[in-house]
Image (cartoon, rainbow, N blue to C red):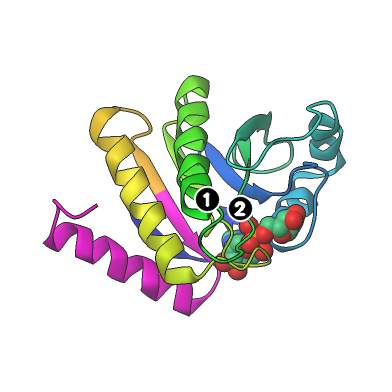
Amino acid sequence: MTVVEGDITRLTVDAIVNAANGSLLGGGGVDGAIHRAAGPELLAECRALGGCPTGEARLTRGHKLAAKWVIHTVGPVWRDGRAGEAEALESCYRRSLALAREAGARSVAFPAISTGIYGYPLEPATQIAVATVKADLEVHAQPERVVFVAFDRRTATVYRQALAALDRDPAKT
Ligand code: APR
């Protein structure tokens, strides 16, 4: 697991994960960036999928992106922390990794799901991201490489601190 600061659409990995909404018909944030970079065929492919529930994920091709696949997952909208947000966010990471494995993706890049427009507080969301991915990678050989892509310095710092904490105290998940 590594952290990079940058634009997920520029990464050369087998699969990039999109923080989508339930319609899968595009939006702002990373969703908008991915659709812009992938081109209109991505939207056409997404239309045929008929949406995606929160916590679930759907696979499409990457079209004009360097990545072969895009895994669209729908994160929870943050309400008060008592509406099942943590479980839904964990499910996004687990389901995305499962789809990546099924597709044979060896490298996967995640954005900071739900921490933008959906308002999930960054620190708890990051804890869920790194702990869930770590647990999955401990029991599966694939994907070999997971990259957390931070779009800003603050997010990168929080991810790096979370990964460092995992290394210091591996029992802590
Ligand atoms: N590359 C990597 N990360 C990005 C990029 C990019 N090009 N653009 C934005 N991000 C980051 C944001 O800075 C944030 O840290 O992705 C993280 C997730 O933020 P959002 O994209 O707002 O996603 P989310 O909070 O899950 O909200 C999803 O926003 O775009 C709409 O259609 C989407 O309705 C859905 C909602």
Q: Give the answer, above or below, for where 22 lies relative to 124.
A: above
Question: What's the residue at 86%, 33% (across, down)?
Answer: 44
Q: Which of 70 and 98 is in front in this view?
A: 98
**In the rendered view, does 166 fall on the left or right side of 111?**
left
Q: Does the residue labelled 2 lie within 8 Å of ligand 1?
A: no
Residue 58, position as x, y percentages in the image: 65, 31
Q: Marks 1 and 2, Cα distance to the nearest angstrom?
A: 8 Å
Quarter of the rendered structure image containing ligand 1? bottom right
Q: Which of 116 and 154 is in front in this view?
A: 116
Q: Give the answer, above or below, for where 75 lies relative to 105.
A: below
**In the rendered view, does 75 fall on the left or right side of 157?**
right
Residue 160, position as x, y percentages in the image: 32, 68
Q: Which of 119 and 3 is in front in this view?
A: 119
Circle 1/circle 2 CB separation < 8 Å: yes
Question: What's the residue at 51%, 49% (across, down)?
Answer: 89
Disc 1: CA contacts within 10 A as few (<14), some (14-19) or many (>=20): few
Q: Which of 74 and 25 is in front in this view?
A: 74
Three-letter residue code for mark 1: Gly
Q: Is residue 9 covered in magenta?
A: no
Q: Give the answer, above or below, for where 90 lies relative to 32.
A: above
Residue under label 1, please give it: 84
Looking at the rendered structure, the secondary structure element under dot 1 is: loop
Residue 166, position as x, y percentages in the image: 21, 58
Q: Is residue 151 covered in magenta?
A: yes
Question: What's the residue at 38%, 33% (across, down)?
Answer: 143
As drawn, the label of residue 128 is none
Please identify the residue farthest to the front as the structure is shown. Answer: 82
Residue under label 2, please give it: 76
* Residues drawn in magenta: 147-173
Question: What's the residue at 36%, 44% (across, down)?
Answer: 133
**In the rendered view, does 104 fall on the left or right side of 114?**
left
Q: Can residue 7 be seen in this view?
A: no
